[in-house]
Amino acid sequence: MQLHEQIREWIQRERQTMLDSLRYIVAINTENLAPGGNETEGQLAVAAMLRMLGCEVDVYDVSSAPGLAQHPRYWPARPCTGRPNVMAIRRGLGKGRSLLFSSHMDTVPVGPDIWQHDPWGGEIADGRLYGLGAYDMKGGLVASIMAVKALNDLGIRLQGDLLVESVVDEEYGGCNGTIAGRLKYNADLAIVPEPTNMAVCPAHHGGLMLRVTFVGKPGWGFSPDRPIDPVIAVARFISMLNDYALHRQQASSVPGIYQDNPTLPILVNQVKAGDVTLPFFGDRVPAQAWLTVWLETYPGMAEDAVLRDIQAYYRQAQANDPVLAAFEPVWQPVRWLDGSHIADGHPGIELLIRLTTDVCRRPATVQGALFACDGHIFNLFSPTPMILLGPSGGQPHSPDEYIKIKDYLQLVEIFIHAAIEWCGLA
């Protein structure tokens, strides 16, 4: 029996094990409760699984990584003290290239919205496995662990080392966990299984999280000392953002990898004004109102240029809007994430395109990922180039998040072949 047939037979034989393993990790609550964390139980579970597979396992505090605080993308608001990363190494013969699967353990908080499926239940229905983080990105993490199990079960030795990593604090643009990983461990290629819907993504977006504050004059609506309502300014600003998003899309130079899907979203994700702890407040205009805006960016865009562009557009809008003309908002960048792109022609791109085509039995989709992630820490700030390839699913960061079981199993199969072909068969 040829090796690819052995691998496919293993996938069918171990289907239940792969589902049970994913359900086990999904069942562990690892919500990212910033500024702290809640990943430790999940990290220790992953470390135990990888030890049982014979890997060398390092569980280390993120803040212990040498030079972490001096890194150009270190975020001091999230030191990650007491939050462990996990690195596991399946040693090869020392003669081939090394491959790293890098995933994050943390999920977004479950939130107040109603779920139809238990967020930590791993319920299976209609070809889907439901749970918080199942799609983003515990499915990809467990797929990489299952690839190690397959190599063991099939008695396959590799020339190069195979590494499996689980980092903390990736959600909300933390990245300190990923920085710590690159300060301690690197490889010849990294695959990051963010949820790409089985598309091979040599690039990903970045983004700017921006808080914009409008300061007014508080007071009673019928006072002779007329108050100035900043809430009205926020409403006008949100309307302006819709126009700006269209303008920005038309004015931006689109990288080749994004030509077929050039969208650059602008999202308002927080709005606050007045005392929100009360059910209502008597007739009073608040002193200030603010909102946070997420502006997606292409690889190569710079933070200062993105900020200058939206400020310039605001100044133009003031000329035609007396409400906006009365306010000079405070612009506060909260977090910047670079977009990045692996080098054109990197052999890892062609490898993953071919394997995805073969396993899924259809031409692979190749595109830039339409989200920001920690990939820039690899491509821009480490010797480890990175490609994104992850499962299909839906509702990420939302109620009833799910992963498609068929694609999860195919992802495991792709990862097995990627390890064999990249690291070399001993």
Image: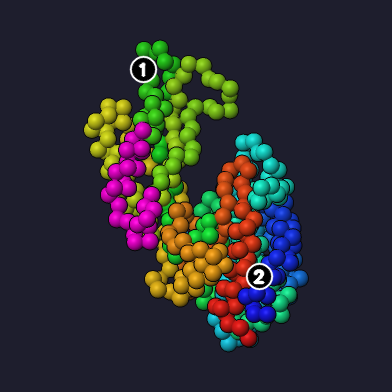
Residue that carries the numbered disc 1 in the rendered image = 226
Magenta stretch? 239-263
User: Dot 2, crowdedness within 10 Å: few (<14), some or many (≥20)?
Assistant: some
Q: Check disc 1 and give the amino acid type.
A: Arg
The answer to whether residue 152 is left or right of residue 212 is: right
Q: Nearer the viewer, residue 270 or 257?
A: 257
Q: Residue at x 64, y 36 (%)?
A: 114
Label 2 sits on a secondary structure element that is helix
Residue at the spot of label 2: 8
- Placement of 21 over or under 213, stated as above or below: below
Density class for disc 1 (Cα within 10 Å; few <14, some 14-19, many ≥20) is few
Position of 265 relative to 193 (above/below): above
Q: If the image is split into quadrants, where does the N terminus sit?
A: bottom right
Could you tell whether 170 is left or right of 350 in the image?
right
Residue 321 locus on image (x, y percent): 27, 29
Q: Nearer the viewer, residue 290 or 100?
A: 100
Q: Quadrant of the C terminus?
A: bottom right
Specify the quadrant of the image occupied by residue 13: bottom right
Q: Secondary structure at mark 1?
A: loop
Of the numbered discs 1 and 2, the one sitting upstream in the chain is: 2
Q: In 3D space, how far apart are the residues under numbered discs 1 and 2 (Cα atoms)?
A: 74 Å
The residue sitting at 55% across, 60% down in the picture is 390
Q: Amino acid at mark 2?
A: Arg
